[in-house]
Image (cartoon, rainbow, N blue to C red):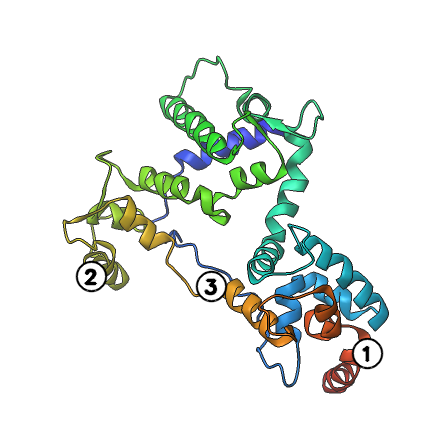
Amino acid sequence: PQLFVCAVLLCAAVAQTKPTLRKERVHHEPELSRQAHEDNKSFQYDHEAFLGKDEAKTFDQLTPEESKDRLGKIVDRIDSDADGYITTAELKAWIKRVQKRYVYENVAKVWTDYDLNKDNKISWDEYKQATYGYYLGMEFEDATDQFSFKKMLPRDERRFKAADLNGDLAADREEFTAFLHPEEFEHMKDIVVLETLEDIDRNSDGHVDEDEYIADMFAHEDGGPEPEWVKTEREQFSDFRDLNKDGKMDQDEIRHWIMPQDYDHAQAEARHLVYESDQDKDQMLTKEEILENWNMFVGSQATNYGEDLTRNHDEL
């Protein structure tokens, strides 16, 4: 499987973009739930924000007693400094982690492919061997493959070192998750910006000009007229991408483009949960306050019984 992964990596690196294919470079904060946020009728939005969509469905099958019991254990995990109080910051961190559950699951699936010595860490050497071992020391017949390999290996090493917060050149689960999914981690965003710049900057001058910006989205094949959406993107470049109007994008402008300061859903939801459950108004929650308002955080068969009857009736 490693050879296949490596071959895919190299093929992906040299593949030409289809003429009308638009790459999605912008990383938006995801919605916490597709449910409406209507607390007077249903806490479904809060359940999915606090637990994640799949886990919220699991809690729907529990009795109130089981729900409260599991919620109590979750509260202990959220209280990262174990001081007995849940702050808005701790709740926000929990919600963000829940919403990123898919990336942790993705890492769990591939972990054993890389942790070759089974020490529950992945060293840079293990990753390099698992991903590039076949190509190390190899004489390349194809110059394009050689160029891709020489570009990808140091780029991976740079990203690995950025994710390796304690500098021991061995990634634990959190560090390896940041390595594989850098767009999800604040301390990795500079790397995402740099890699985006390198992908688009064809003349290697450290900036992205308008033509490079357009070429990343649209490849001329027949020299015909540009589609209307490409003309619109040229206007976007001059009006909203090139903020200092010097005709090109630097790293700060690229960051502004691909990582816009979206509405912080996790922060808003954390504040909302604290506000609604904070009985003594000290801006923090105790486990008792959360369990007192348990049905806002988690669901159960009892709280959803009437809703289920209605839904089943509608489906019939």
The quarter in which the C terminus is drawn is bottom right
Dividing the picture into quarters, in which one does residue 297 lie?
bottom right
Q: Residue at x 75, y 63 (%)?
A: 71
Amino acid beneath label 1:
Ala
Q: Residue at x 24, y 37 (%)?
A: 206
- Check the image and report above or below for 285 versus 120: below
Count the numbered circles shown: 3
Amino acid beneath label 2:
Asp
Is residue 188 toward the left or the right of residue 292 in the image? left
Whichever of callouts 3 and 2 sits on the residue coming sooner in the sequence is 2
User: What residue did someone put label 3 on?
Assistant: 264
Q: Position of residue 224 (x, y in %)?
A: 21, 53
Q: Residue at x 45, y 37 (%)?
A: 12
Measure the C-alpha gap from mark 3 to mark 2: 25 Å
Q: Is residue 221 visible?
A: no
Whichever of callouts 2 and 1 sits on the residue coming sooner in the sequence is 2
Measure the C-alpha gap from mark 2 to mark 1: 54 Å
Q: Position of residue 287 (x, y in %)?
A: 72, 64
Amino acid beneath label 3:
Asp
User: What residue did someone put label 2 on?
Assistant: 239
Measure the C-alpha gap from mark 1 to mark 3: 32 Å
- Check the image and report above or below for 22 versus 165: below
Which element is circle 2 on? helix
Q: Position of residue 239 (x, y in %)?
A: 20, 61
Q: Position of residue 261 (x, y in %)?
A: 38, 59
Q: Nearer the viewer, residue 186 or 316?
A: 186
User: What residue did someone put label 1 on?
Assistant: 302
Q: Nearer the viewer, residue 204 or 253?
A: 253
